[in-house]
Image: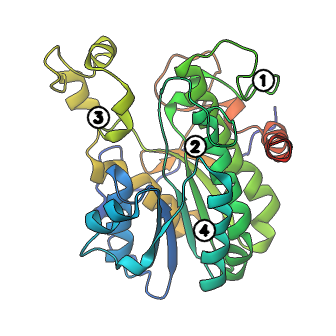
């Protein structure tokens, strides 16, 4: 496997419980344009609030525009919110092309939206839901935004991966669960591995055009992302007690939403990363590589950052889309 020599921890001054306000202290984004998917819920909302607070104009696509406008009232204007459904690729293309036409320069794109551990659903184009929403929809959006990201000459793309990437590499033999038995956690892991690999390949392709790519594990956070999990399953994981309250383990290890968005903000804005790209990050730092068989809930597995696998994921995603 070919792994970037940059994929190792560095001294950042931040840690696992650093707050968004700490990470953004002294950051001036005046005149910058940012786009955040899933920017009206959970850590996405806090990401938008932090970027706006630093002076950026933030664009938020939404499948439920009325809800987004209500949630983001007082944070961004309604004119900065538009309709896009990651599970319907034509809507993604329409939104992305419209945004790129109206904003010829985009400085930051944070692909934050996602679904986790859901039953076997299919998108409108027949893609397995987690692969389609988490990875393919964002891949299509990225293609529409590339000219505007190139024009920024210093843009950054941040994709939200997860420690759940440890549950599955990308299965090129059946990415779309056409023939193999569906497993919701393996499907989630595959999608999160794919999101990491998208950042790796984008960085390889576009660093010369000024775009750097980063993937991020935000940490464990209680948000609507867990909507497909019952309390019995979360209690089995040790996240909650039988009454649905956060367990002592969760209270120690889990992050608040303002802590959970800190790594995305760090990867999107900090000058320490000016000459780094194509790396997986966690806890406001570049992650260390751990063995693929490791049971640790930290670090990145090699399959999620391997450059050859990243190139193949990019081309296989293109091929998958072309067959729809």
- Quarter containing the C terminus: top right
Q: Mark 3 points at which residue?
A: 254
Q: Which of marks 4 and 2 is in front?
A: 4
Q: Are marks 2 and 1 in contact (CB under 8 Å)?
A: no
Q: Are marks 3 and 2 in contact (CB under 8 Å)?
A: no
Q: Nearer the viewer, mark 1 or mark 3?
A: 1
Q: Mark 4 points at which residue?
A: 95
Q: Can residue 276 be seen in this view?
A: no
171 to 156, vertically: above or below? above
Separation of residues labelled 2 and 1 (CA atoms): 17 Å
Q: Name the residue under label 2.
A: 134
Separation of residues labelled 1 and 3 (CA atoms): 33 Å
Q: Which of marks 1 and 4 is in front?
A: 4
Separation of residues labelled 1 and 4 (CA atoms): 29 Å
Q: Quadrant of residue 16?
A: top left
Q: Quadrant of residue 124?
A: top right
26 to 191, vertically: above or below? below
Q: Are marks 1 and 4 in contact (CB under 8 Å)?
A: no
Q: How is the image coloured?
A: rainbow
Q: Nearer the viewer, residue 141 or 3?
A: 141
- If you read the primary sequence from the N terminus, does the residue marked by circle 1 or circle 3 appear first? 1
């Amino acid at each position: 496997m070919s792994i970037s020599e940059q994929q190792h921890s560095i001294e950042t001054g931040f840690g696992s419980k650093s707050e968004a306000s700490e990470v953004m202290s002294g950051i001036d984004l005046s005149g910058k344009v940012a786009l955040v998917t899933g920017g009206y819920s959970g850590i996405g909302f806090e990401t938008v609030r932090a970027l706006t607070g630093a002076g950026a104009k933030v664009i938020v696509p939404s499948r439920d525009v009325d809800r987004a406008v209500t949630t983001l009232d007082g944070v961004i204007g309604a004119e900065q919110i538009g309709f896009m459904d990651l599970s319907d690729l034509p809507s993604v293309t329409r939104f992305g092309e419209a945004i790129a036409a109206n904003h010829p320069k985009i400085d930051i794109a944070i692909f934050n939206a996602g679904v986790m551990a859901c039953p076997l659903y299919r998108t409108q184009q027949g893609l397995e839901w987690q692969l389609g929403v988490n990875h393919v929809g964002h891949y299509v959006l990225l293609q529409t935004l590339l000219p505007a990201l190139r024009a920024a000459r210093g843009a950054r793309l941040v994709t939200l991966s997860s420690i759940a990437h440890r549950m599955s590499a990308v299965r090129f033999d059946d990415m779309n669960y056409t023939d193999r038995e569906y497993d919701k956690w393996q499907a989630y892991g595959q999608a999160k591995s794919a999101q990491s690999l998208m950042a790796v390949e984008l960085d390889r392709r576009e660093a010369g055009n000024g775009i750097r790519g980063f993937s991020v594990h935000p940490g464990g956070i209680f948000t609507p992302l867990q909507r497909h999990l019952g309390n019995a399953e979360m209690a089995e994981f040790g996240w909650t007690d039988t009454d649905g309250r956060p367990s002592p383990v969760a209270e120690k290890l889990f992050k608040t939403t303002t802590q959970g968005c800190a790594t995305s903000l760090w990867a999107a804005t900090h000058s320490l990363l000016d000459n780094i790209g194509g790396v997986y990050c966690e806890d406001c730092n570049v992650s260390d590589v751990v063995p693929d068989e490791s049971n640790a809930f930290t670090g990145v597995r090699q399959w999620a950052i391997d450059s050859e696998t990243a190139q193949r994921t990019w081309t296989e995603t293109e091929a998958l889309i072309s067959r729809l």
